[in-house]
Amino acid sequence: VSLILSSLIFCLLLTDVTDWANVGIYKNCNVACRLSYSFFHANLLHALLNVWCFLSVVFFFNVSIYRLLLSFLVAITIPTFLLSTTATIGLSAVVYFLFGSISFSVKDKLRYHFWIFLYIAIGFFAPNTNAIIHLYCYLVGIVFAFLNNLKTRKNAH
């Protein structure tokens, strides 16, 4: 599934999007924009970075189809108050949720969180980066990981 989604992202690079508001997520956007924004990217570098992170997490941490669906659900249901009036596109909301969701599985948790928060902080200063969405999805992923860890511990006893 992740390879098919990645292929779709690269195929969509071939489409000529003249107005990102037609496919991006923003305040008061329509449902079609919420459902499609993760698959559109501004350029090849943007797509490569997002897809590389996505596939790395999926394959190195053996992410299930259910977690993939949950990451997409979180990405498309970002609360309106976190969205700007400028359209946002890209797979990074899904990726940041996945980053948060594996946070209990990484060996060096302190270093891991440091680097992710550094990437998020840099995003606040980088042009055309919606760092608030990255932060939101990462934190929701951490909550998911925490709840999943509690469930696993409870089932182990």
Image: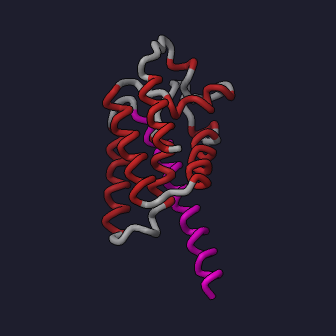
Q: Is residue 121 above or below residue 42?
A: below
Closer to us: 72 or 79: 72
Instruction: Please state if 94 lies on the left or on the right of 154 as rendered.
Output: left
| Rendered location of residue 106, percent (x, y) | 39, 67
Residue 57: quadrant of the picture: bottom left
Is residue 132 something that shows in the picture?
Answer: no
Q: Position of residue 122 (x, y in %)?
A: 32, 44
Q: Which residues are magenta?
A: 129-157
Instruction: Answer with the quarter of the image where residue 34 lies.
Output: top right
From the viewer's side, name the closer residue of 1 and 126.
1
Front residue of 105 and 58: 58
Residue lying furthest right: 31
Say whether residue 15 is visible: yes
Within the magenta stretch, is there residue 11? no
Q: Residue at x 35, y 71 (%)?
A: 107
Q: At x 56% / y 34%, what residue is drawn? A: 83
In this view, which residue lies farthest toward the bottom? Answer: 157
The quarter of the rendered structure image containing the C terminus is: bottom right
88 over 50 or under it: above or below: above
Vertical position of residue 16 compared to residue 65: above or below: above
Q: How many marks?
A: 0
Does the segment drawn in magenta span residue 138? yes
Q: For the point 56% across and 50% down, which residue is it?
A: 68
| Residue in the picture at 33% in, 27% down | 44
Give the colour scheme of this rendering.
Answer: secondary structure
Left or right: 17, with 78 as reference point: left
Across and down, in percent, residue 129 comes to 40, 34
Measured as percent of width and height from the top left, residue 117 is found at 37, 54
Dominant secondary structure of the magenta stretch?
helix
